[in-house]
Image (cartoon, helix red, strand yellow):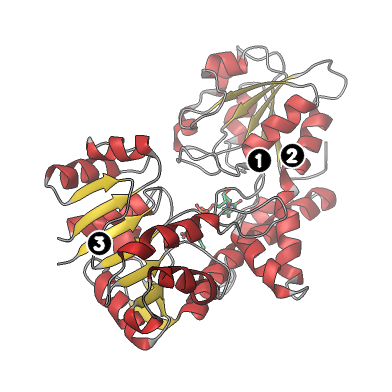
């Protein structure tokens, strides 16, 4: 069993540190945020992820996981810091760079360094490695690999263990060393390659999803014009044994799928035409929803809109890059009175359900949280001023809402309002 230093204790770093500790390693988690360090050392967590709190508490209690703000010597280092996007849609690598600089003085001959953050191709070789060597070692002294995380927020602990992984080394020995470490907790298959191929593989995975969601969104917009119900059409098309169309919606959020395709566009020198167009289609969906809201509230002065859901997807608390938040902001700018209800959303302006719906001229479902399945349209009908609901996820039970007197308008269904 090894001593492992995990740099960055966020949505990926903390679960990874915990799973490593759980498989017997001694783990030191490093984070620049003092409050995060203090929280973890108390055996608590600062993010919401099912089952993580219990695991962290147990590992801290057992003395196998502790947090600190400065790296220390270890056998292996795992870097899991954010790689956001700049206003110019370029990869922001400053966190990766400062993580590399911070570990460089603690590296010893034979150490393994793994980068898990999503990065543009060649970052491991061209950016990470030179910074790791600023402590005085040469490339031959270190084992360095890129191994992207693949976990789905909401299912991180299960997927960390069960998903297969791609491991790209700067040389074969590095890939083998990283494989040996992951093999201590991953039940899925471990595939070895070079660092740059692994970087591109990660970007291709999320781009595949983005392009396919864009296709579903484009189908929805076309269906509205042609008077087709896109949800039925997709359901029928997916009966074909080799077709799997994704779901339309108010846009693509989160810190991965809406971001990673830009890392390809950035380097592709104009070749990434489909990928770029998909990004533009998905980024345009909040505006499409706004247009529908304007149509459905035409003639009402200072309409009140009740928004159901603000997170970037169902059943998480994360609002990063959330299209629902973007819609709320745009509506307020346009002079709408906006009241949002979301029992999970973190750091957002929300109100209780009754307050959101009271005197609303339009109710808009933006996120299909499981918690919304229990909403009673009969009860909501008594609160609102106008019984009109816009469903951007194609999930509401039309008969039930119509029985309560609501007019139900669904994104991707029939003619535009
Ligand atoms: N969405 C749709 N229609 C769909 C599916 C999703 O509009 O049919 C929207 C969601 O509402 C959400 C966004 O797309 O706003 C992204 O949600 P997601 O559940 O597809 O993905 P993420 O961002 O939570 O996690 C993804 C995963 N990547 C893939 O499935 C290829 C995950 O495995 C990655 O680890 C993660 O990105 C990451 O960190 O890269």
**Quadrant of residue 306 within the rendered picture:** top right
Residue extending farthest to the left is 62
Left or right, residue 405 beside residue 47: right
**Quadrant of residue 305 within the rendered picture:** top right
How many numbered marks are there? 3
| Residue matched to label 1 | 392
Q: Position of residue 79 (x, y in %)?
A: 39, 61
Secondary structure under the numbered disc 1 in the rendered image: loop
Dot 2 or dot 1, earlier in sequence: 2
Secondary structure under the numbered disc 2 in the rendered image: helix
Do the residues under discs 2 and 1 have CB atoms within 8 angstroms?
yes
Give the camera-side residue of 285 and 223.
285
Dot 3 or dot 1, earlier in sequence: 3
| Residue matched to label 2 | 289
| Residue matched to label 3 | 73
Q: Where is residue 24 in the image (x, y as percent from the top left)?
A: 14, 60
Image quarter of the N terminus: bottom left
């Amino acid at each position: 069993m090894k001593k492992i230093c995990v740099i960055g204790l966020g949505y990926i770093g903390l679960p990874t540190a915990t799973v490593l500790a759980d498989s017997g390693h001694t783990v030191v988690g490093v984070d620049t945020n003092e409050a995060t360090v203090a929280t973890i050392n108390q055996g608590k967590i600062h993010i919401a992820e099912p089952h993580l709190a219990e695991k962290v508490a147990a590992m801290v209690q057992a003395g196998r996981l502790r947090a600190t703000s400065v790296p220390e010597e270890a056998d292996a280092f795992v870097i899991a810091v954010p790689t956001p996007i700049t206003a110019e849609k370029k990869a922001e690598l400053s966190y990766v760079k400062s993580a590399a600089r911070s570990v460089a003085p603690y590296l010893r001959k034979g150490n393994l360094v793994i980068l898990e953050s999503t990065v543009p191709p060649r970052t491991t070789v061209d950016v990470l490695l030179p910074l790791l060597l600023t402590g005085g070692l040469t490339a031959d002294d270190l084992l360095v690999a890129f191994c992207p995380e693949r976990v789905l927020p909401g299912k991180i602990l299960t997927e960390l263990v069960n998903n297969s992984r791609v491991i790209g080394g700067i040389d074969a020995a590095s890939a083998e060393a990283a494989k040996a470490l992951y093999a201590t907790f991953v039940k899925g298959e471990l595939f070895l390659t070079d660092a740059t191929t692994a970087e591109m593989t990660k970007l291709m995975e999320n781009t595949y999803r983005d392009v396919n969601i864009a296709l579903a969104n484009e189908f929805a917009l076309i269906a509205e014009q042609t008077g087709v119900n896109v949800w039925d059409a997709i359901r029928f098309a997916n009966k074909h044994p080799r077709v799997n169309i994704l779901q339309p919606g108010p846009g693509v959020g989160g810190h991965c799928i809406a971001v990673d395709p830009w890392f390809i566009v950035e380097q592709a020198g104009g070749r990434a035409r489909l990928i770029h167009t998909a990004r533009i289609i998905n980024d345009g969906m909040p505006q499409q929803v706004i247009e529908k809201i304007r149509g459905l509230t035409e003639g009402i002065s200072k309409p009140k809109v009740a928004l159901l859901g603000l997170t970037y997807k169902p059943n998480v608390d994360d609002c990063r890059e959330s299209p629902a938040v973007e819609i709320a902001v745009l509506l307020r700018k346009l002079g709408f009175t906006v009241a949002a209800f979301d029992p999970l959303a973190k750091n957002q302006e929300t109100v209780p359900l009754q307050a959101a719906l009271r005197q609303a001229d339009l109710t808009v479902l933006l996120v299909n949280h499981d918690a919304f399945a229990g909403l009673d349209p009969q009860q909501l009908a008594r609160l609102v001023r106008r019984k009109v609901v816009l469903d951007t996820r194609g999930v509401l039970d039309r008969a039930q809402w119509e029985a309560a007197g609501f007019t139900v308008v669904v994104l991707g269904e029939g003619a535009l309002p």
